[in-house]
Amino acid sequence: MSVETEQSIATKRMPAGLGGLLPALTLIGLFFVVPVLALLLRSVTDPAPGLQNYTALLGDGTYMRVFFNTFLVAAVVTIVTVLVAFPVAWMLAIMPPALASVMFGIIILSMWTNLLTRTYAWMVLLQRTGVINRALMATGIIDQPLPLINNLTGVTIGMVYIMLPFMILPLVGTLRAIDPMTLRAAALCGASPFQAFRRILLPLSLPGVAAGGLMVFVMSLGYFVTPALLGGTSNMMLAEMIAQLIQSLLNWGLGSAAAFILLIVTMALYALQLRLVGARRATGGI
Amino acid sequence: MLLDYDHMGWLKTALLGFTALVAAFLLLPVVFIVLLSFGSSRWLAFPPPGWTLNWYQELFADPSWLEAALTSARIAALTAILAVLIGLLASFALVRGEFRGREILRGLLLTPMVLPVVVFAIAIYAFFLRLGLGGTTIGFVVAHTVLALPFAIIPIATALEGFDKSIEDAAIVCGASPLQAKLRITLPSIRIGIFSAAIFSFLASWDEVVVAIFMASPTLQTLPVKIWGSLRADLSPVIAAASSLLVGLTLALMIVAALLRRKFKT
């Protein structure tokens, strides 16, 4: 009885806790919402009011190729990441803890290592005279160095490397939540391992795959550093184009219009992800 | 038997082999960069013709590297402090508050994590140009705190959700003021969330490239901006030396995090 009274007093004293949100909302409102909205406004007012920036972007073959390229790279990266991550997450979910913690350690080390450091390593590894080409030539698999950098191959390798932890870690959770008994039941009922995989394990893990894949796709769409360093000038991606429009060409109108398109696509896919997995899961559990 | 580790037969061998390959793929660039930084070839030949500490000497002989590292450390430390303080207050409100639109506010505070950084980077760049904050430490810290806030809120709110509030209420019933109860009961109980928040928001700033490229001025450069500039110029082994030190720092942070987790669990 007395506890309840005290509790309600405590709740009343802090009117629903809104005060605690004040600093965060001020920060985000003033230094996130306002600047982003001002940028979007600029896309329809710079250099003159109207939609000419958008018609210029969407009517020009060069810009359209950048959009196409961006979606292509993001799609390829997502597919490769899912295919590589799934077996690893599967093993991590059922491995003996000691072995799993070694693998988790490797994943975290790769994930926490400075982004530029990792990209620099790939730049050196993938170059014409780099270790990978030399090893492939020494073993006689190829006799000419493969063009692995300044093209989509380089971007894909570098991006998959960066995205893998973001796919593996949530998938482990999904796979751990599956009751092994369902698969034992399938085996008892005469299902072959392949049937059990296709009809039980895969469908049950699909929500995790979809959520992780969508996150990787969204992150890849707006990625700047890796495509800029590992991709060539002939296959630029959207984020790099936006940066160039603003920083080198000082074309604020076109740059902010392109940024707005990126924002809309990202937010739409994010909303889709929220509906798929619910707000809590999508943002990591809170 | 697809989820039974001990009864998977050949499939287990195949999947374990594949997992080992992925582990090698994940380790390859990290190990490679460290080996390369001790190699004597200026043209990054590998395996190197000999071993040397030249690149580390060159790195420490150039004061701009150290200066960039100190700038990064200062900005990341300030960012972590601000993000944890603001995130702590916000987490209490988000987890315990009951008001309309809570989910929307939660979503809003986490949006900087989802929005492509390049969009935020040019937005805040334009905004700070107008305010005269471009290229200043304050500008860097504010922009990085926006980006780091989700990484502070998520672990703190998660820890707070797992904390039984009736323990705090019990302290209040026993005569503690609400503030005392929070400071002496609740905060120590969620300290692992707070430490995670500090590490994550520090890293969010320390590793941040895109905003930094736009915000940097000739007199104020963070380490990623310095590396970015060097990378665009050439692939000098000095970058490998700087990178190896960063790998060392990452390892140190991982060890600290693991030790803290172990200490808090017992």
Image: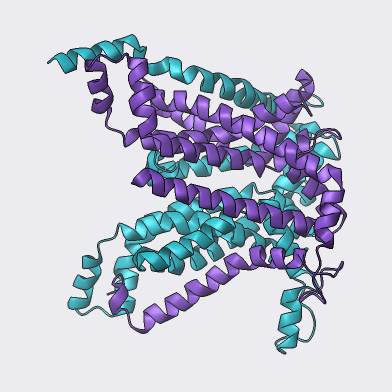
Chain colours: A cyan, B purple
Q: Nearer the viewer, residue A99 or B111?
A: A99
Viewed as shown, does residue A10 lie left or right of A143? Answer: left
Residue in view at x 60 percent, y 66 percent: B27
Residue B111 locus on image (x, y percent): 53, 34
Assign the C terminus of chain A to one quadrant of the image: top left
Q: Nearer the viewer, residue A260 or B156?
A: B156
Residue A181 locus on image (x, y percent): 21, 67
- Outermost residue on the left side: it is A1
Query: Can residue A236 be seen in the rendering of this structure?
Result: no
Query: Can residue B138 be seen in the rendering of this structure?
Result: yes
Residue A247, image quadrant = top right
Q: Is residue A184 above or below residue B160?
A: below
Residue A273 locus on image (x, y percent): 45, 45
Residue B36, image quadrant = bottom right
Viewed as shown, does residue A65 lie left or right of A37? Answer: right
Residue in view at x 50 percent, y 17 percent: A22
Residue in view at x 76 percent, y 63 percent: B37
